Amino acid sequence: MARLPGLVRAIAEHDRRGEKTIAHIARQVRDAGLISSTRRGVGASIMAFSDAATLLMGVCGDSSPQGAVAAVHHLRSLQPLPWDRVDRMKREDLAPSLAFLRDTKGFAGTLEKLIEHAPEVERWHGTYAAKASEQEGLSEAEFSARRVAKKLTSAVKRGTPGYGRLVRIVCYVPGVAAEIHLGNPWLSLGEDDAFHEYYAVPDRAAEDADATLMDCSITIEVGLPTLLALHEAVVRP
């Protein structure tokens, strides 16, 4: 079972910022008491899936290690944006392969479940990708979306950006909003074997309706490899 350095290595394997930066973020989060133990070394606590989710929020919630603690607090407060009837029904009707997401609450809880069930997400990913590759008679809109995804994947040689991946956890710096996608967003109304949610601070969504829009948006995104690495780090003997 992992201690904090194991979680750091799991994230650093898939993050260009490197292990030193991730370790610095981990220390900030640990010293703020946001994970199981503030003890170091041999006596440090065994990490749980909730700790893995907390560290990942610290890593993805801000572009600066100094902002990691505040980012965790912000991301923990995020809730799904107000649903309409369609969204509510889609969560209730999730396919058995994604049933573990039906009762999740908030961004932090959903992220924890994705790490805990990462092997199931990997199996879902294989099935979904195979189904998508066999689909015929694509609409012009879907064909265009897939073409964009392919171009993005070709443009970024050492990673799969944006719509080029089927599993996306997107955090808006400094933890002011988030998205989680399992599946292609442009098909979200017609699939029960996919999951798409958008998260914000509940009160802020209403308060900021007339606020000046910011043109510069910074996001940090992770996908299935990071979820799998964190899962393995937590459960590894």
Image: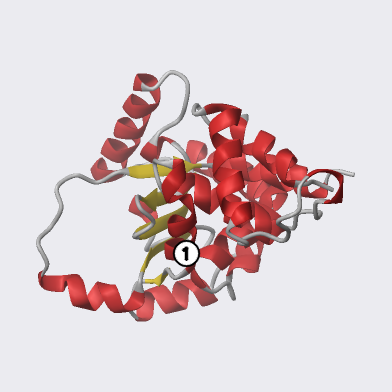
Q: Residue at x 43, y 18 (%)?
A: 157
Residue 213, percent across and down? Answer: 12, 57
| Residue 225 visible within the image | no
The number of numbered discs placed on residues in the rendered structure image is 1
Q: Residue at x 24, y 46 (%)?
A: 217
Q: Is residue 121 left or right of residue 160?
A: right
| SS class, disc 1 | helix
Q: Identify residue type, mark 1.
A: His
In the displayed structure, 111 sits above or below 131; it is below
In the displayed structure, 155 sits above or below 94; it is above
Residue 122 lies in quadrant:
top right
Q: Nearer the viewer, residue 39 or 73?
A: 39
Residue 11 lies in quadrant:
top right
Q: Nearer the viewer, residue 90 or 38?
A: 38
Residue designated by label 1: 73
Report the coloring of the rendering: secondary structure
Residue 67, percent across and down? Answer: 42, 50
Residue at the right extreme? 237
Q: Nearer the viewer, residue 119 or 232?
A: 232
Q: Is residue 87 left or right of residue 1?
A: left
Q: Residue at x 76, y 43 (%)?
A: 232
Q: Residue at x 37, y 75 (%)?
A: 86
Residue 223, percent across and down? Answer: 53, 42
Quarter of the picture holding the C terminus: top right
| Residue 27 visible within the image | yes
Residue 205, percent across and down? Answer: 26, 73
Q: Residues within 10 Å of mark 1 (few under 14, many from 20)?
A: some
